[in-house]
Image: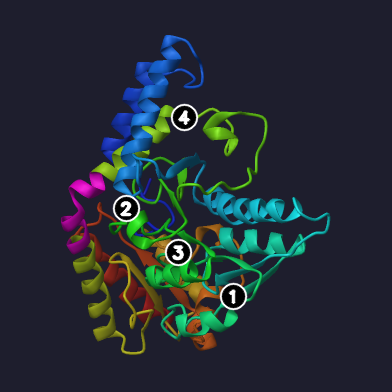
Amino acid sequence: MKKFIYLDHNSTAPMLPEVANKITECFAAGFVNPASQHRPGQLARKHLENSRRKIANYLGAKTSGMDTDQLIFTSGGTESNNLAILGLVNALDSKSNNTSDLFVPQHILISSVEHPSVVGAAEHLVRLGHSVDKIPVDSHGVCRVDQLGSMIQGNTKLVSLMLANNETGVMQPVKEVAQLCRDRGILFHTDAVQAVGKIPVHFRELSVDALSFTGHKLGGPRGIGGLILKHGLTPAPLQFGGFQQMSLRPGTEDVALVAGMETALDTFYQNEADYYSGVLTLRNHLEKTLLSRFPDLVVNGAGATRLPHVSNLSFSKVDRQSFLMAADIKGLAISTGSACASGSSELSPVLLAMGLEKNVVENSVRISLGVSNTREEIDDTIEIISNILNQLQ
């Protein structure tokens, strides 16, 4: 197979060697069902709960005392976001119906640049009779906090704003919005899937009520994610038929996958400073060199604070699909945006929400770096992109 330069870490980061070793170690240990009451089951439960506590600590949740936060393991970011959005609104709806036989519609606010798993959950709530509005963003892709206050209604019960955008890497004012929601008695959820393992994320310092994340974006295994819930907050379950995780997410927990995700987080925090400066240097080199060669290149979101490893580029005079096909042939693995929507021919809702010109939106690509990328690879990437652009233009 041809050697590819992999620059699609926002889709999935290659599994770290440490993670693969930990998962293999767990499989070799023969951990059984952690719900079983016999001693082998108790041993599996001990390992699972140790990993749960360590992951929660890494992400700034409170793990001891009377107001302990809760970490629910899920299959990944999409399930975590759905459990947060649907579960919390359904729980609020159930409380309302305890005092009345009438359906009480709730109002939900999400930003206009959310991931499809948040947007899809919100659209499902609309089908159930609730109402959803989208908070606008500015031309850099940053949530317009100045407009949020006027959008809140008397029945607004939940606001969801991602911590960092999956297409542009633009960071959102989560802490500011969380405080506004807290002052108004509104629940606040953040999708931190693209931020965890790329920058330090602290649940309590963000002052959010719920936070979603996943393992495979940071070099962990696919099929495992999590939802951190503030103490005392209980969403309605989306699945039924088991008592695991207090029946909020029934099903047998996988000790190996959880341990793998813990190892990925451990590896990140051990190398946090080097990771940040490393990928930031490579990204800046990529953008600066390409801009010097192609002045009409647009770096989407460049005017905002971004994750250090993400670059969303628009080549206004080049067809995006032709560019991607040529890049793939040359051994360059990049994408157009969210992998969950990569099969769609529709224009990026994120870039459209930023009010960018149509040709900029139509011809955008996303490059997302990772710890495995080298300066040599980025230099090669620059030459590949330059050659393709010169040929297509």
State the SS at label 2.
loop
SS class, disc 4: loop
Between label 4 and label 1, give the one nearer the viewer.
1
What residue lies at 41% left-to-right and 20% top-to-bottom?
44
Counting from the top left corner in percent of width and height, residue 46 is at 37, 23
Residue 36 vertical position relative to residue 191 in the rendered view, above or below = above
**Where does label 2 land, which residue?**
197
What amino acid type should be assigned to the residue bearing mark 3? Ser
Q: Give the range drawn in magenta.
A: 267-277
Q: In which quarter of the image is residue 164?
A: bottom left
Of the residues under marks 3 and 4, which one precedes in the sequence? 4
- Spot occupied by residue 89 in the image (x, y as percentages of width and height): 64, 57
x and y, in percent, of residue 335 in the image: 45, 64
1 vs 3, front mark? 1
Q: Quadrant of residue 48?
A: top left
Secondary structure at badge 3 equals loop
Of marks 4 and 1, which one's residue comes earlier in the chain?
1
Q: Dot 1, how many residues are within 10 Å of its Cα: few (below 14), some (14-19), or many (20+)?
A: some
**Gap between marks 1 and 2 measured at Cα:** 27 Å
Which residue corresponds to mark 4? 254
Q: Residue 62 carries which label?
A: none
1 and 2 marks in contact (CB < 8 Å): no
Q: How far is disc 2 from disc 4 in space, using C-alphas? A: 21 Å
| 29 relative to 212 in the view: left or right | left
Q: Can residue 391 be seen in this view?
A: yes
Please name the residue that numbered disc 3 is placed on.
335
Q: Which residue type does callout 1 highlight? A: Lys
> In the figure, 176 relative to 229: above or below?
below
Report the mark closest to the observer, 3 or 2.
2
Asked whether disc 4 touches disc 1, contact meaning CB atoms under 8 Å apart, the reply is no
